[in-house]
Image (tube, helix red, strand yellow):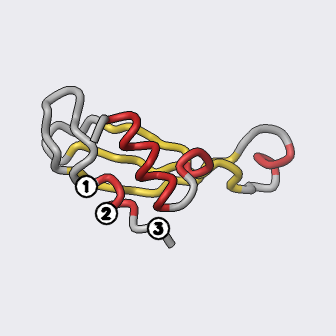
Amino acid sequence: MTNWYKVFKGRWRCPKCGSQEIIINEHSFTGTGLSRLLDWQTYEYVAVTCARCGYTEFYSKQVLGGEKNAIQILDFLFGS
């Protein structure tokens, strides 16, 4: 299991207030049609919330993959 706090800590900066203090949550959502009817959680996200102002960004676990892939993607996005 990936430690998402470790992945994002020091790499993520709030675009609203500039803080690097974060809160990490994981969320699952249903899709439409049959998956909604059967309550299958088909979409999984990591939510990074600024601990100072509350601004939140969602990142798809499917895109981030494991910790190694996530670090590479975040380094590309944030230029670390």
Residue at 39% from the left image edge and 43% from the top image edge: 74
Q: Quadrant of residue 4?
A: bottom left
Tag 1 near tag 2, CB within 8 Å: yes
| Screen quadrant of the C terminus | top left
The amino acid at mark 2 is Lys
Which residue in the structure is indicated by mark 1? 9
Which residue in the structure is indicated by mark 3? 2
| Local secondary structure at mark 2 | helix
Which residue in the structure is indicated by mark 2? 6
| Disc ID at residue 27 | none
On screen, residue 15 above or below 8: above
Residue 57, percent from left and from top: 38, 37
Residue 54, percent from left and from top: 23, 39
Q: CA distance from mark 3 to mark 1?
A: 13 Å
On screen, residue 71 above or below 3: above
Residue at 58% from the left image edge and 45% from the top image edge: 63
| Local secondary structure at mark 1 | loop
Q: Quadrant of residue 38?
A: bottom right
| Local secondary structure at mark 3 | loop
Q: Nearer the viewer, residue 73 or 37?
A: 73
Residue 21, percent from left and from top: 16, 50
